[in-house]
């Protein structure tokens, strides 16, 4: 069977990144694919850039989601529903394939028995701050393999369409919709494969306030995903201890590796600000619940600081 691939890209004001990303996708060695954009209210020229390609390529399409209806899961479900591929990829608009065989390597991984989900490596972009790069290197390291735990990241992840049809992305979660679907897929006896060769450079350029917001919504999502686990209840009851310990461990590692770092923000003040934002956000996410309206405004469209 010849695989048809759909690449779903969520976007909000990603114009400069798409100018880099789209040519990289069109230059892939594998040509049997379509690109589906799901935009949630861009006003920076993103729509103009996408439209310029719509007139040239019949394998590129654009759909919209209302800002007030946006969640990460819902926007992906829209893209997956519109897809024609038997393999569907979720790719961040600020994740750039590092070579022209990125797509080819993802497709190859699905030839392994029972593999239903493939996620690729995410290397830090040279403009990504030092502490964020440390996190990315910890998450995406080692050789390609079937993983025993439940982990993946929708910045660079692919799904068999049937896996998604069995359990679509949870549209109520404030994040980690990938982890949630991966957990359900594993319960249905699908394997998750880490493909180190399907590498992208992930560009994170966020304010410290936005970083805190990201970790807050992800902690709240993880709490909801694992709400029936006793171990997670233990963590919630001891959130401050776990966060404080994580803060110290993160600062110690970042300082140790900062001497040879080529990333920006490798000074001690930036390291402290990043790790403080990370673990204050995590603490708030585990401790608090928010209404739908506040969740939409704060989590998905936070004020620029």
Image (tube, rainbow, N blue to C red):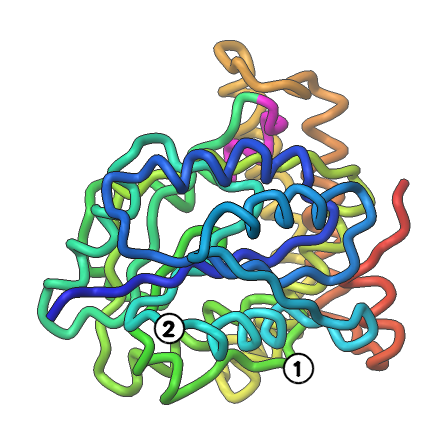
Which of these two is toward me, 2 or 70?
2
**Picture layout, residue 66 above or below residue 188:** above
* Residue at 75% in and 50% down: 212
Q: Is residue 154 visible?
A: no
Earlier along the polypeptide chain: callout 2 or callout 1?
2
Label 1 SS:
loop
Q: Position of residue 52 (x, y in %)?
A: 62, 43
Q: Residue at x 82, y 48 (%)?
A: 43
Task: Label 2: state its secondary structure.
Answer: loop
- Report the label total: 2
Horizontal and vertical percent for residue 69?
76, 77
The image quadrant that residue 232 belongs to is bottom right
The residue identified by callout 2 is 84
Q: Give the farthest residue toward the top.
A: 259
Report which residue position mark 1 lands on.
Answer: 172
Q: Is residue 76 left or right of residue 48?
A: left
Instruction: Write down the region rendered in magenta.
Output: 127-135
**What's the residue at 31%, 31% (across, down)?**
99
Q: Nearer the viewer, mark 2 or mark 1?
A: 2
Q: Quadrant of residue 163?
A: bottom left
> How many neighbours does mark 1 have within 10 angstroms: few (below 14), some (14-19), or many (20 or more)?
some
The image quadrant where one finds the N terminus is: bottom left
Q: Is residue 243 left or right of residue 252?
A: right
Residue 173: x %, y % from top left: 64, 76
Give whichever of 211, 33 is nearer the camera. 33
């Amino acid at each position: 069977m010849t695989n048809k691939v759909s690449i779903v890209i969520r976007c909000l004001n990603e114009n400069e990144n798409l100018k880099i990303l789209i040519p990289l996708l069109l230059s892939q060695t594998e040509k049997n694919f379509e690109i589906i954009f799901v935009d949630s209210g861009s006003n920076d020229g993103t729509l103009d850039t996408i439209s310029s390609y719509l007139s040239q390529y019949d394998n590129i399409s654009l759909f919209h989601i209302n800002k007030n209806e946006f969640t990460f899961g819902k926007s992906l479900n829209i893209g997956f529903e519109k897809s024609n591929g038997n393999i569907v990829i979720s790719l961040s608009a600020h994740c750039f394939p590092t070579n022209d065989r990125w797509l080819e390597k993802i497709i190859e991984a699905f030839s392994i028995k029972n593999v239903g989900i493939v996620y690729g490596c995410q290397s830090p972009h040279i403009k990504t701050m030092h502490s964020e790069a440390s996190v990315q290197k910890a998450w995406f390291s080692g050789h390609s393999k079937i993983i025993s735990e439940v982990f993946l990241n929708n910045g660079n992840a692919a799904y068999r369409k049937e896996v998604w049809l069995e359990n679509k992305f949870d549209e109520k979660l404030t994040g980690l919709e990938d982890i949630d679907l991966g957990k359900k897929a594993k319960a249905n006896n699908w394997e998750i494969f880490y493909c180190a060769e399907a590498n992208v450079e992930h560009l994170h350029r966020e304010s410290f306030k936005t970083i805190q917001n990201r970790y807050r919504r992800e902690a709240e999502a993880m709490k909801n995903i694992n709400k029936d686990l006793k171990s997670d209840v233990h963590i919630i009851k001891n959130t401050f201890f776990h966060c404080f310990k994580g803060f110290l461990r993160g600062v110690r590692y970042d300082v140790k590796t900062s001497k040879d770092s080529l990333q920006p923000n490798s000074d001690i003040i930036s390291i402290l600000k990043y790790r403080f934002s990370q673990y204050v956000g995590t603490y708030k996410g585990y401790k608090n619940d928010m209404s739908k309206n506040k969740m939409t405004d704060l989590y998905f469209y936070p004020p620029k600081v």
